[in-house]
Amino acid sequence: MGLGLLASRALRSSRIIRNSTRTIVSTPELKNADAAAAAAAADAPSDLPKRNPVGGARVHLPNPEDVIEVFVDGYPVKIPKGMTVLQACEIAGVDIPRFCYHSRLSIAGNCRMCLVEVEKSPKPVASCAMPALPGMKIKTDTPIAKKAREGVMEFLLMNHPLDCPICDQGGECDLQDQSMAFGSDRGRFTEMKRSVVDKNLGPLVKTVMTRCIQCTRCVRFASEVAGVEDLGMLGRGSGEEIGTYVEKLMTSELSGNVIDICPVGALTSKPFAFKARNWELKGTESIDVTDAVGSNIRIDSRGPEVMRVVPRLNEDINEEWISDKTRFFYDGLKRQRLNDPMIRGADGRFQAVSWRDALAIVAEVMHQIKPEEIVGVAGKLSDAESMMALKDLLNKMGSNNIFCEGNGMRPNADLRSGYIMNTSISGLEKADAFLLVGTQPRVEAAMVNARIHKTVKATNAKVGYVGPAADFNYDHEHLGTDPQTLVEIAKGSHPFSSALKNAKNPAIIVGAGVFDRDDKDAIFAAVDTIAKNNNVMRPDWNGLNVLLLNAAQAAALDLGLVPESDKCIESAKFVYLMGADDVNLDKLPDDAFVVYQGHHGDRGVYRANVILPASAFTEKEGIYENTEGCAQITLPAVPTVGDARDDWKIVRALSEVAGVGLPYDSLGAIRSRIKTVAPNLLEVDERQPATFSTSLRPEVSQKVSATPFTPAVENFYMTDAITRASKIMAQCSALLKK
Amino acid sequence: MASVVRSIFQSIKEKGIGNFLKELKQEGYVRCLADGNLLQTKIHNIGATLVGVDKFGNKYYEKLGDTQYGRHRWVEYAQKNRYNASQVPAEWHGWLHHVTDHTGDELLLLKPKRYGLEHKENFSGEGDAYIYHSKGHTLNPGQRDWTRYQTWQPTKKE
């Protein structure tokens, strides 16, 4: 019997004595020392405070056999096999410092900031690159781990300039934050700091390459998510630098995201440079309306100005990326704004008038015109509330000629599955063959394209494309340029038919540009045949999609904005343009009276007789439905400009002046009106799939024409009134459009 | 004192009584009856050497010997009713404040032609026109435009 054992025996016996000598005990079971010791041993792990995963993440264990248990700081955590040590720590609620690791990118393991101590490992290990093994004992808060991170931090700060006070990343910089935890208060480095020549990546991304810590997140983002091999690493050792190999611009529609993923201030926003500090900004969680994807964004504003737009996480729609158009169009909100009601005088000049006069004139003219000659056109940025109000107003006036631009003159609003993306955007990841019909997702909906790119990269899914020659950033087969190709595929005589046939989850995506074609019904019939032949629509998989172009389209069709006659523009005497700039007014009679209600002086105002200034989407609350049928709400971030009012309020006021008052005068009331028409629009942030499938579509006798498909979007950067007013977007289209 | 009285009589004899009184007023001798500072400067001036006169007419005096060191250089301002230190131009400032022994006239030769600005006195407190208003102030005539958006101009026509 060793001395130690003797001593412990003596201690234990004395404890028993002490326990038995105590007379007042609140827990009688403690009197039985052996039982108490056993109970204490069993409860030991549960003594640790309950820990929640970082960021409130939920852990999904798909396969119970593949679950392993590791210990993080003594806390047992169950994780699926194949996770890294860093992920295990996150599930255990321990946030590991990191620079190069990003959950959506491949693992590089080159910053070494995530070092942790693992029991029985001779050295600290880089947790982001180390797979977790069963029973691993990970220690994240030991002196060894702390010392390792402090060492890494000292090396990182060695060549990092001390220009935080003039750096745009200041206040939201990973390096700044982590150096507060692991940085030394003095430096030992006495040599000269390294400096690197700045690269010109184009009009959007500003580079200060001396600040770069070579985490290679941007390089991995460019090749893995954006799908362009523009960025890369040059040199070795201290001569290592990020660059574009040869002097060229970054030609990706997602390039702005490198600003967000850069952990330091090496890549920052060029239009935002030196404009504001991030702690001065007020963030408003809103929705992007520049395309039909409805990316979730945060509008950062200071006072009455939108200072920048950054993405918000939404796994189902945009993950954590947004397109460059979404991120940088915001300067368009400050230019070409309509701020006063205006009336065109006899001399053809506009004159600012009061709301009372403007509405009185519109109401007077509206009453002098035959009801069937009144036409309403909703613009591509209209929210559901205003479209509902406009439709109700025109119906009360006796007209039923109202449509939304981009939907064509004969839209099919009967079957919801016929105009939304039935697979859902995140559902596209399950597809293993794509057929793109007349759509160039890269310019029409960059975030959908990013999903397809992700799927193609992960599963080598086959992509067939029918349409004009277009730019793709993944492997695709160009099957043809006109709808005849579709007929061939439907018959099964086309080589791509076998690829569709063999696919488990084929997805067909039809572009909304088809809506404007005369043979649209025939094209949709051909697509339906392809879908039927290839088992595209099953109870567990609906692969037939329509990719819309504009934020207002889906809601407009849900609300039934369908014109009574497809020649209504030709016979119109009174046209109410609600932000509609791209509707073709060439055939409009010269004596027609045009009212333009909108926020920008764009194409629509030049034909207008009366201008009613409205608020932009950053200034109002409105429901927008995206292309997959998910209704989302924008929130006002900044005040309206000048005398402008919300769209639905203008229509409501006009109805009052015209003597046909609409029965709602609050946002809540107008939403309950929407509920009677399209209840799915009120299920906010929840995708509402279509109930009936397109198989109910009536037979068509129309034949497809041989006219080739045309690109639906000419210029990715300038598609609507706001983006056309933006200087940054003009710069982008001048520099980046090939 | 006797020499002062003698020189007064001499100048009356030279200029005549009318001109003498006019000069007396111009030189601030009338004013100094009410202004103690000016009176003291005038008394101080007796027996001092006039080192120079700048372009504004300020007179710079020096008296070495029995004067307390540090009070041996002073200025008599050209304006007798409102004077302040900002009326001393840059070239004389150094001499007056014992920064240099070169007089202003000597330093004026060194004044750079390209960027040497004309001296301007400070008018602070001399009425609303001279009060500094920041760019955003309502009273600043060139008030900055706080409108953060640009309006569409209806004059443009396709």
Image (cartoon, coloured by chain):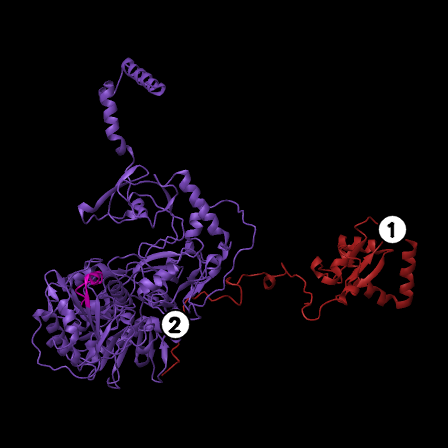
Quadrant housing the N terminus of chain A: top left
Q: Is residue A619 visible?
A: no
Magenta span: A420-433
Between A665 and A656, the residue placed more toward the observer is A665
Q: Residue at x 45, y 48 (%)?
A: A153
Residue A431 in the magenta stretch? The answer is yes
Residue A247 located left or right of residue A439? right
Q: Residue at x 33, y 38 (%)?
A: A73
Quadrant hosting residue B45: bottom right
Does residue A625 sit above or below A77 in this rendering?
below
**Label 1 sits on what residue type?**
Gly
Q: Secondary structure at mark 1?
A: loop
Residue A464's disc is none
Residue beneath label 1, please? B65
Between B124 and A455, the residue placed more toward the observer is A455
Does residue A275 sit above or below A655 in this rendering?
above
Query: Residue B115 at what x, y percent from top left?
Result: 67, 69
- For chain A, the rendered hue is purple
Q: Is residue A690 visible?
A: yes
Residue A105 located left or right of residue B125? left
Query: Residue A347 at what x, y percent from top left?
Result: 36, 85
Residue B24 located left or right of residue A269? right
Please state the chain letter of the residue tagged with numbered disc 1 in the rendered image: B
Residue A732's disc is 2
Does residue A283 sit above or below A255 in this rendering?
above
- For chain B, the rendered hue is red
Same chain letter for marks 2 and 1: no
**Label 2 sits on what residue type?**
Cys
Residue A361 in the magenta stretch? The answer is no
Quadrant hosting residue A714: bottom left
Badge 2: how crowded within 10 Å, few (<14), some, or many (20+)?
A: many
